[in-house]
Image (cartoon, rainbow, N blue to C red):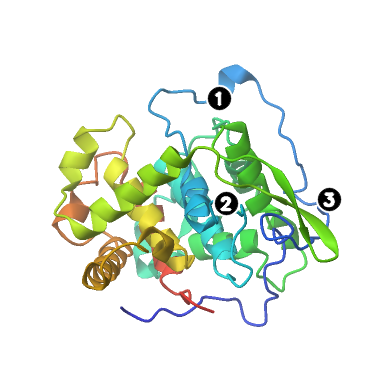
Amino acid sequence: MSTITRRRVAGASSSTDDNNAVDGSHSPHHNATSPSSEKKIAYDPDDIDDSKSTPRLTLMEEVLLLGLKDRQGYLSFWNDSISYALRGCIVMELALRGRIAMVKDSNRRKYPLTDRYIEVINDKLTGEVLLDEALKMMKISEKMSVASWVDLMSGETWNVMKIGYQLKQVRERLAKGLVDKGILRTEKRNFLLFDMATHPIADTACKEEIIKRVCTMLVTRVSASSIDSQSDVPHAYLRTVCMICAAYAANVLENALLYMQPDLREQAFNKVDELMNDFSTWPFAGSGAKNDIRPGSELSLEVVAATLNVLTKMDAIL
């Protein structure tokens, strides 16, 4: 397994924005003057992309589900990686839905992949509150790089003028969204001196399907074309790759591989390393990677590659 290093802004504070969520600690309130301070977004239902090809779960929700303890309904208290990885998932989800893309400028190739600027190319709402909040911020702000957006949404910046771009309570909001979708339920648990809302699994079949998809991708010979042909969701193969790589960076992928034999588990992690290497470069490397680059989507998929490149610079274990 390759070693990856956590990418942090020098001297930046650790992410405390969503720790009062599934793991029980408390977070500060929104900055009332910040772009991300709005907890609700008003919209016209006709403006929402309700296409039948929209995936039931976002990348963020799938990664969160892999991290949740099924019966206890909370994440590991020692996992300091998932917060940053979830922000990367938000950027990739917007790119896969065709909302954002690299700025079309031939000079961008002079810069490292993660330092290239992104822009909003379609501001139609997704109906997912976190995605729409991030999309709204990107639309009204100056153009910034992929790495900058992931850092800012994670709260990793010394620039007090940009601290308002931090997305707050991401894990709790994702969990509540999964409750609304019938996949989790809400319970109260007592932890010594305080009560905490937890979210045990209500629909075990949903998480089992995610685990099955992970295992199939990592230990069998499966092609991009075969997965894409069986799904009406655009970029189905690439979506699974992104979810697996993000789960690996978030240090929750092992939860999907617990019941594998040791040799198969080692094979699975070797495959993850291969996927991370192939899909964190642009254009994608490897035979399976190249199949998912379709005409008209190149600039959006370049954002996906850049985000995965950011995630490869995280520590799997902090």
Image coordinates for residue 101, horizontal then vertical, percent: 43, 47
- Residue at (25%, 67%) from the top-left corner? 261
> Which comes before the other along the chain, label 2 or label 3?
3
Does residue 240 lie above or below 46 as drawn? below
Q: Nearer the viewer, residue 85 or 136?
A: 85
For the point 68% across and 42% down, which residue is it? 186
Q: In what element is the residue under mark 3? A: loop
**Which one is in front, 13 or 196?**
196
Total marks shown come to 3
Disc nearest the viewer among 3 and 1:
1
Residue at numbered disc 1: 48
Look at mark 3 in the image and give the residue it sits on: 33
Secondary structure beneath disc 2?
A: loop
Residue 66 percent location from the top left of the image: 47, 54
Query: Is residue 129 positioned above or below 88 on the image?
Result: above
From what the image shows, is residue 299 above or below residue 234? below
Q: Nearer the viewer, residue 286 or 64?
A: 64
Three-letter amino acid code of the residue under disc 3: Thr
**Closer to the eye: label 2 or 3:** 2
The residue that label 2 is drawn on is 71
Count neighbours of disc 1 (C-alpha within 10 A) and say few if under 14, some if 14 to 19, many if 20 or more.
some
Cα distance in 3D space between marks 2 and 3? 39 Å
Q: CA distance from mark 3 to mark 1?
A: 26 Å
Q: Is residue 241 visible?
A: yes
Residue in the image at 36% along x and 42% along y = 209
Going by the numbered disc 2, the residue's amino acid type is Arg
